[in-house]
Amino acid sequence: MTDKGRKRPLLAVVLAFIFPGLGHFYLRKWVRGLLWLGLLFMLSVVFVATGAIDPVTQLSLDAISSSYESRPTVVTIGSVVITTLNVVDAYWVAVNENQTQEVEAGTMCPNCGKELDEDIDFCHWCTTQLEPVEADQQ
């Protein structure tokens, strides 16, 4: 299989760790990325006190730092949980998408997931009978 349509799970993980949703945007899973981003945003809106920082008068690094330090523990724990689940989901989506592409290309067994031999029409690992690939599909 060529690397043309293949996604890099490690890159998706790094992007998801930087900010929830970015790894899914890289994978072109727009709705899923927006859901992760929205989940983090809703956590902030629900649990952070209104008026914790006034962006007009207190736009300084000290004001932002003090509001970050005074945020509730629930928000900190929630952010860590959301980020962790987002990273795991981005990795899972990337790996599954790559595996699906390999199965569709006929290089991987749809039953056991192991590499196929091109010369035979069954998987020599699990003996699953494979459908013949048309010449125009290759």
Image (cartoon, helix red, strand yellow):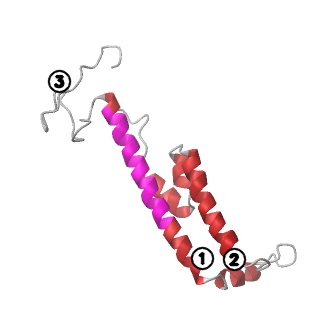
Question: Picture coordinates of residue 133 (x, y %)?
Answer: 27, 20
Disc nearest the viewer among 3 and 2: 2
Q: Is residue 115 magenta?
A: no
Figure check: 3 above or below 29: above
- Quickly name the residue at label 3: 121
CB under 8 Å between callouts 1 and 3? no
Tell me which label, 1 or 2, sits earlier in the chain.
Answer: 2
What amino acid is labelled 1 in the image?
A: Val
What amino acid is labelled 2 in the image?
A: Val
- Quickly name the residue at label 2: 48
What amino acid is labelled 3 in the image?
A: Asp
Is residue 34 at least partly visible in the picture?
Answer: yes
Q: Residues within 10 Å of mark 2 (few under 14, many from 20)?
A: some
Q: Which residues are magenta?
A: 83-103
- Quickly name the residue at label 1: 75
Residue ID at (41%, 54%): 91
In the displayed orientation, state which residue is furthest to the front.
46
In the image, 10 versus 45, the foreground residue is 45
